Image (tube, rainbow, N blue to C red):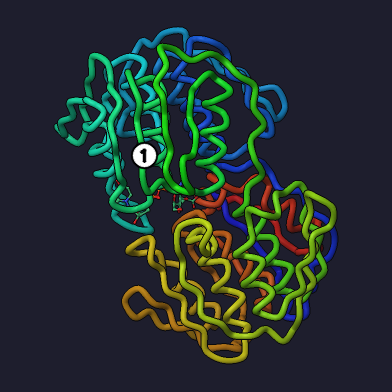
Amino acid sequence: MEKLVIRGDRDLRLKGEVRVSGAKNAVLPAIAASLLTSEQLRLSNIPHVKDVETILTLIAELGGSYEIAGDTVSLRVPKIRSDEASYELVRAMRASILVLGPLLARFGKAVVALPGGCAIGSRPIDLHIAGLQKLGATISLEHGYIQAQADRLHGAVIEFERKTVTGTENLLMAAALAKGETILKNCAMEPEVADLAVLLNKMGAKIDWVDEDTARVRGVKELGGATHDIIPDRIETGTFLVAGALTAGDCLVRGIVPENVGNIIDKLRASGATVETEGETALRVVGSRDVRAQDITTSPYPGFPTDMQAQFMVLLTQAAGTSIITETIFDRRFSHVNELVRLGASIEVQGDKAVVKGKTPLSGAEVVATDLRASAALVLAGLVAAGETTVTEIEHLDRGYERFEEKLRGLGASIERAGT
Ligand code: EPZ
């Protein structure tokens, strides 16, 4: 198992430029969409992260083919030789559930392992299943697998009980090939969902937004190929903005979409950092040693993203005063708290709230990564912890951050990857 070794410095100031990669949570549904057509899909600006390897392996196992050239992947699924997404792959990445809708829509059958839970919560998929049943699928759960069948999906009116990112994505893809019109109400509006709709329309789908979170999908008989640029990763953007604020540094984060990180910018400014746009696709963050405490509540887009909760918590450990972080999206997304306490933070979890008391000087220690965003948070904390911090089990980090330590070194951090 690999680990990251960080030589922290309480007076560190990150400085310089960093370019973010394409969004993991945009490229995964885009790759799943290749199952909807027999023609070629070309996706550029893809991030080279573990989850992309995993879903490409899944597409190949189903019978598709792909080739990668630089940051572009070309995919083609003329037919499938299997309709099963194995537990082994789904357990490795629950976003494998994104093949359910496309397999059902194009081939009329899908056998997908139930994802199970993970470090951040129970992760049910009842809303995916309920929506697909409304479109006419027959779905049963047997031996830990979702067995789904449908001669031809038909349009329906579906209202999600709660906003679900991959649930919305699955239903957009399934409805695109259903017979007739589908209305999807209470859709998740994350930029990655909106961008999937753009891609599907490029492939010949007929999706339009009839109000801010209602999609109308007029089904078509078949979809064609397309070429598409993956949008920049807004969570990686937020992670580097927080890194600049945390170290009272001066960082230019490039290759981004500023309007996709509006809420993160607001909270950083409220904490005392300066954040300014530089041109259309870059943000400059200048941090301050006087970090202000504030309360944060995660909520669906355009609210404060749950995927930024752990990283922002690290900043708040350096704020003078008490901050209350309320996690409303997942039922167990505080596993990073115990590890931050090992580094010297003063945080107490009370139900869905974490009470952060600052300012607490941090000191280096060995800590364990438990999930993707927790890993990034522990690395950020290590940057400003006196002495050496070792973050182990960083396979979690590699699932969603491309060359993370290299990018941080480019900003002046002292961080190396080491074997076990
Ligand atoms: C997506 O997960 C992201 N993953 C997550 O990012 C992100 O944290 C999450 O959305 C919320 O923004 C990808 O896009 C691949 P949800 P997803 O369905 O779709 C409940 C990361 O770090 N729910 O929007 O699985 C669910 O339990 C990852 O990059 C149901 O109850 O999340 C949760 O409480 C982590 N039934 C809430 O809804 C369902 O059928 C939101 O989940 C589906 C979801």
Relative to 8, 300 lies left or right: left
Q: Nearer the viewer, residue 370 or 390?
A: 370
As drawn, 273 above or below 168: below
Relative to 3, 283 lies left or right: right
Relative to 35, 72 lies left or right: right
Q: Nearer the viewer, residue 364 or 285?
A: 285
As drawn, 411 above or below 86: below
Residue 173 visible within the image: yes
Q: Residue furthest bottom?
A: 321
As drawn, 112 above or below 357: above
Residue 277 is drawn in which quadrant?
bottom right
- Residue 271: x %, y % from top left: 65, 79
Residue 93 visible within the image: no
Q: Residue sitting at 57 percent across and 37 percent down?
A: 195
- Residue 115: x %, y % from top left: 31, 41
- Residue 329: x %, y % from top left: 38, 61
Q: Residue sitting at 22 percent across and 21 percent down?
A: 149
Which kind of residue does numbered mark 1 sit on? Leu
Q: Is mark 1 within 8 Å of ligand 1?
A: no
Residue 287 is drawn in which quadrant?
bottom right
Residue carrying label 1:
184
Element type at mark 1: strand
Relative to 338, 48 lies left or right: right
Q: Residue sitting at 45 percent across and 73 percent down?
A: 337
Residue 102 is drawn in which quadrant?
top left
- Residue 402: x %, y % from top left: 65, 45
Q: Residues within 10 Å of mark 1 (few under 14, many from 20)?
A: many
Q: Residue sitting at 77 percent across and 56 percent down?
A: 253
